[in-house]
Image: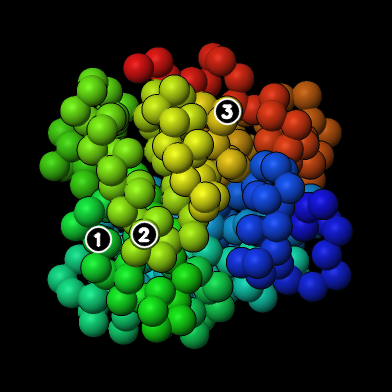
Amino acid sequence: MSAHSFTRRLTQADLAKLYQAGEKVSMFTCYDASFARLLDGAGVDTLLIGDSLGNVIQGHDTTLPVTVTDIAYHTAAVKRGSEHAFILADMPFGSYQESPEQAFRNAATLMAAGAQMVKLEGGAEMAATVEFLTHRGIPVCGHLGLTPQSVHALGGYKVQGKGEAAAQRLKDDALLLQKAGATMLVLEAIPAALAAEVTASLNIITIGIGAGKDCSGQVLVLHDAFDIPPGKKAKFVRNFMEGASSLHDAALRAVAAIKDGSYPAPEHTYAG
Ligand code: KIV
């Protein structure tokens, strides 16, 4: 079972069924209708309108300048271009940290633009906001580990969750987000063993990016996976254009590698 098996758009319940059946969930970031059509045609389960659009589309150094209006615009385009994939939209920096009410107002804008779930960064400090949203009909995906909106506080784009105290905090945060009602959790740039432990401790979907093979699914940043622009990328990135005959072929290979567990391989993984 994958997005290809559906004649309609996937729902949160469909993703839960994939997870319960032990099938890896595939996710790509996506920002426009043409790539949405291409990825949808390759059977990608979930399209994330990531605030990485600040980097790869707008040319900024960080995700911080991205606005709710930007994400809503790109979400509507991705929705128009796709028929089957589940649509997840990022809540940008400054759009949810102030209060649960502020988060609700901005999440509602993204849901109206076509999102089926919103993603926000942070752990314990976000639990009340996650509960507020999920109790009001807005599905939420958490995001722990390397949280790019905190790049300045973290002192750069560095692997997180190293050492006993940091690992314990991340495990506690994951459980708190699940308890608050989050039904999906992105784990970014953490040791593979920690991601495996977190995944085993939860009954919601974990989506890894630089978090090893034992997450319940993987997210690929579109421009990384298709090597745009060509050049050196983070350790966890695999160039799916290598050996592919077209973008469609590369997307098919990426979905297959996520589903059969061959991506990420040990060389894409961080140790503790
Ligand atoms: O914005 C984004 O692309 C993301 C992924 C790194 C998960 O949040």
Say which of 176 and 114 sits in front: 176
Q: Which corner quadrant of the image does residue 114 belong to? A: bottom right
Say which of 99 and 58 sits in front: 99
Amino acid type at mark 1: Met
Left or right placement of residue 266 versus residue 68 in this view = right
Tell me if label 3 and label 2 are in contact, CB under 8 Å.
no
Say which of 82 and 34 sits in front: 82
Which sits earlier in the primary sequence, circle 3 or circle 2?
Answer: 2
Find residue 264 and report its horizontal and vertical position in percent. 59, 26
Q: Mark 3 — residue?
A: 213
Amino acid type at mark 2: Lys
Find residue 32 and report its horizontal and vertical position in percent. 59, 64
Left or right placement of residue 251 versus residue 1 in this view = left
Which sits earlier in the primary sequence, circle 2 or circle 1?
Answer: 1
Q: Mark 2 — residue?
A: 179
Q: Identify the residue at image location x=23%, y=38%.
A: 169
As measured in the structure, the alpha-carbon distance from the residue carrying label 3 to the one carrying label 1 is: 27 Å
Q: Identify the residue at image location x=42%, y=61%.
A: 182
Q: Mark 1 — residue?
A: 126
Q: Is 220 located above or below residue 121 in the figure?
A: above
As measured in the structure, the alpha-carbon distance from the residue carrying label 3 to the one carrying label 2 is: 24 Å
Amino acid type at mark 3: Lys
